[in-house]
């Protein structure tokens, strides 16, 4: 569980650290607001992907299924700044398909933590492999990192792309390319 008191204390120190008056009117409620917000944006630490992927349906056939443009918001663990964008998931069922919206819920479990994009991509793919047991899965994440764009290291709108493939997607370039042509 999130410790709200610790967060509030830390935010007060942070405000003082940047030279602010933590007691002034506009900032008085800020530590409390940040603590409540953190509880929500880091809720993934308490959540498990298995729960969302437990409900499955029998696959009609084992053709590739793609869930694209899943919007996510996460926080980078290096700067504690947001990174956000889209996740595209493709998988080849092995008799089972996930319920509608469950892949998006799975993404959320890993996005709502302090993260690095590569790790979030791999965790999503591994959770689907573990709980849904498809023949293969591929996860592509395109994200903008505020820690880069806000500081002018990179131009606004520039995106970082990560991709992780497991099972049949690892070896099969044709499958991989079919997925890429469908999500891009
Ligand atoms: Zn960062």
Image: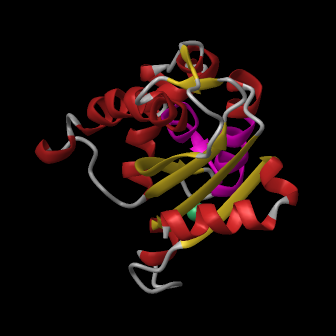
Task: List the single residue furthest toward the right.
Answer: 171
Q: Which residue is drawn at 39% across and 81% down?
A: 156
Choose top left, top right, bottom left or bottom right for residue 25: top left
**Residue at (62, 43) in percent of width and height:** 63
Residue 126, position in %: x, y? 75, 36
Q: Is residue 158 visible?
A: yes
In the current view of this chain or complex, which residue is farthest to the left?
25
Q: What stretch is highlighted in magenta?
A: 108-126
Q: Quadrant of residue 34?
A: top left
Q: Which colour scheme is used?
A: secondary structure
Residue 82 visible at all: no
On the image, the x and y values in percent for residue 30 come to 25, 39
The percent coordinates of residue 123 (x first, y second) are 70, 40
- Residue at the spot 75% in from the left edge and 32% down from the top edge: 129
Q: How many numbered tags mark residues here? A: 0
Looking at the image, which is closer to me, 13 or 121? 121
Does residue 12 appear to the left or right of 119 in the view shown? Answer: left
Who is closer to the viewer here, 123 or 97? Answer: 97
Residue nearest the viewer, comparing 130 with 28: 130
Give the vertical position of 120 relative to 172 (above or below).
above
Left or right of residue 71: residue 47: right
**Any magenta on residue 37?**
no
The spot of residue 120 in percent (x, y) is 64, 46
Quarter of the image where ligand 1 sits: bottom right
In this rendering, would 143 be left or right of 24?
right
Label the magenta part by its dominant secondary structure. Answer: helix
Q: Is residue 124 magenta?
A: yes
Frontmost residue, 121 versus 17: 121
């Amino acid at each position: 569980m999130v410790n709200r008191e610790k967060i509030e204390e830390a935010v007060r120190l942070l405000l003082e650290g940047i030279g602010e008056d933590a007691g002034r009117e506009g900032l008085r409620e800020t530590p409390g607001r940040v603590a409540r917000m953190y509880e929500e944006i880091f809720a993934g630490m308490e959540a498990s992907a298995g729960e969302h992927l437990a409900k499955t349906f029998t696959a009609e056939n084992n053709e590739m299924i793609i869930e694209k443009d899943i919007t996510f918001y996460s926080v980078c663990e290096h700067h504690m700044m947001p990174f956000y964008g889209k996740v595209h998931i493709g998988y080849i069922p092995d008799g089972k398909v996930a319920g509608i919206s469950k892949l998006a819920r799975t993404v959320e479990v890993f996005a709502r933590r302090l993260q690095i994009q590569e790790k979030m991509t791999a965790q999503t793919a591994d959770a689907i492999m573990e709980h849904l047991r498809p023949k293969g899965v591929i996860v592509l994440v395109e994200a903008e990192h505020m820690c880069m764009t806000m500081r002018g290291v990179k131009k606004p709108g520039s995106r970082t792309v990560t991709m992780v493939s497991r099972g049949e997607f690892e070896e099969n370039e044709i499958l991989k390319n079919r997925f890429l042509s469908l999500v891009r």
